[in-house]
Amino acid sequence: MENNRRKFLKSLAGLSGLAASAVPNLATARATSGATVRDIRLSKNSGYLRLVFDLDGIAEHSIFTLHGPERVVLDLKKVKMPHGMVDQVQANALIRSIRSGVRNDNDLRVVFDLSKSVTPRSFLLAPSGKSGHRLVIDLHDNKRPSARTIKLNKRDVVIAIDAGHGGRDPGAIGRSGTYEKTVTLQIAKRLEKHINKQKGMKAILVRKNDRFMRLRERIHKARDNHADLMISLHADSFPDPRARGSSIYALSVNGASSETARLLAEKENAVDLLFGDVNLAVDDQMVKEVLFDLSLTGTIESSLDIGSEILGQIKSVSRVHKKKVQQAGFAVLKAPNIPSVLLETAFISNPREEKNLRSATYQIKLAKAITRGVGKYFARKAPPGTWLASSDGEYSVDSGDNLKTIADNYQVNEKDLRARNALYADNLMAGQVLKIPVS
């Protein structure tokens, strides 16, 4: 029984990122022979300090805290360390000093004298690439707001999905009789489903059924739902049936300039559309036009950025008709403060692409690709006050790390970690910086 237990613990020690509990006498691995500390490295992160002990073998360890004064004690069994090595870790705002000593003839104790209370976390990393065995110690500041506190009042990013055409307006019609209004609504519903699966994002359908909607009504629906992004779905058509591929459009600069005057001429206060309830006390019409033009220009820049992300993901699903985001004066893109893109999903006039547009498999692949593009954009530029704009610190990926290990070490959900960083694959790169999500 004891032999089996030892074998099990030994196998665990080889796993990357085995987490150790911050309580006395709980070891993360059984060392089969003595090890030596080769180096100690320190790095500062948001809300915590990280110490990495480079070892030449597996080390059984435990870590615990003492109070009055504040200390963290690290015990390593059958481990040696060259005299004076702890001195290379310079004192800082958290660590006043580090002491080390030999215990029980062949064990090592390291004591961190601290300026305030912390919560220590430790885990082992197995050899990977040029890196050998590593023991990682994270000292988390107890006075920082907890992830649960940070989460309060954090909203989702809202994506308005507009299925083009509808009702008495069928849109383009394929050679096999496929209606554009039908496939755009089908794709919109699949996209809504996949976006709503993503933590921190919420989708709303502008058109939920086969009904006619004016273009301005679509914009108002997105604005009424406080959308952070509007995606208008269409299916292209061309007299030559050989034309094929997807395209993405954002509003043109000329479209922005002409829209300024039109919006300001509407009965409703255009400045309120842009700035909400903020009273700018601006009476000069030229100043208002400049402010509006600046807003539309900024919105266009965001639209081009989002469009590029979506286009990059669609390339893995189907042929791209235009390799870059195009710009045009589509009325549905003229929301003054909502980044908007129009996606021509495929050419319904092309027999092969018409067949794809009717295919559930193709529609799902397309919806997933759009979701990935949206996720990658908002992982970089989420609006303030949203869950995707919040983080509980950062982590720089080390060689041999994996998502499950990082999530376990920070006690966060792996799916949340993926969503916060728009990670849709398992591969990580050394040096890659991940945002730790609030939980």
Image (cartoon, rainbow, N blue to C red):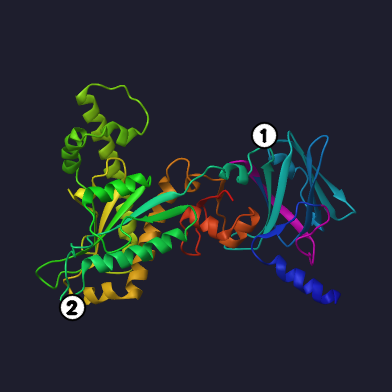
Left or right placement of residue 40 versus residue 212 in this view? right
Residue name at image x 44 percent, y 50 percent = 379
Q: Residue furthest right?
A: 104
Q: Residues within 10 Å of mark 2 (few under 14, many from 20)?
A: few
Left or right placement of residue 325 versus residue 148 in this view? left
Q: Is residue 31 above or below residue 416?
A: below
The residues colored magenta run: 24-49
Q: Is residue 400 visible?
A: no
**Measured from the top left, where is residue 325 in percent x and y?**
24, 54
Return the residue nearer the eye: 286 or 425: 286
Left or right placement of residue 70 versus residue 209 in this view? right
Q: Amino acid at mark 2?
A: Ser
Callout 2 secondary element: loop
The magenta stretch spans residue 31: yes
**Measured from the top left, where is residue 66 in percent x and y?**
82, 42
The magenta stretch spans residue 33: yes
The quarter of the picture where residue 397 lies is bottom right
| Marks 1, 2: nearer the viewer | 2
Return the residue nearer the eye: 365 or 169: 169
Label ID, residue 176:
2
Callout 1 secondary element: loop
Return the residue nearer the eye: 173 or 37: 173
Q: Residue furthest left?
A: 239
Label ID, residue 197:
none
Counting residues from the start of the chain, the first of labels 1 and 2 encountered is 1
> In the rendered view of the protein, which quadrant contains the N terminus?
bottom right
Reading the image, the residue beneath label 1 is 92
Q: Residues within 10 Å of mark 1 (few under 14, many from 20)?
A: few
The quarter of the picture where residue 80 lies is bottom right
Q: Amino acid at mark 1?
A: Asn
Residue name at image x 46 percent, y 62 percent = 424
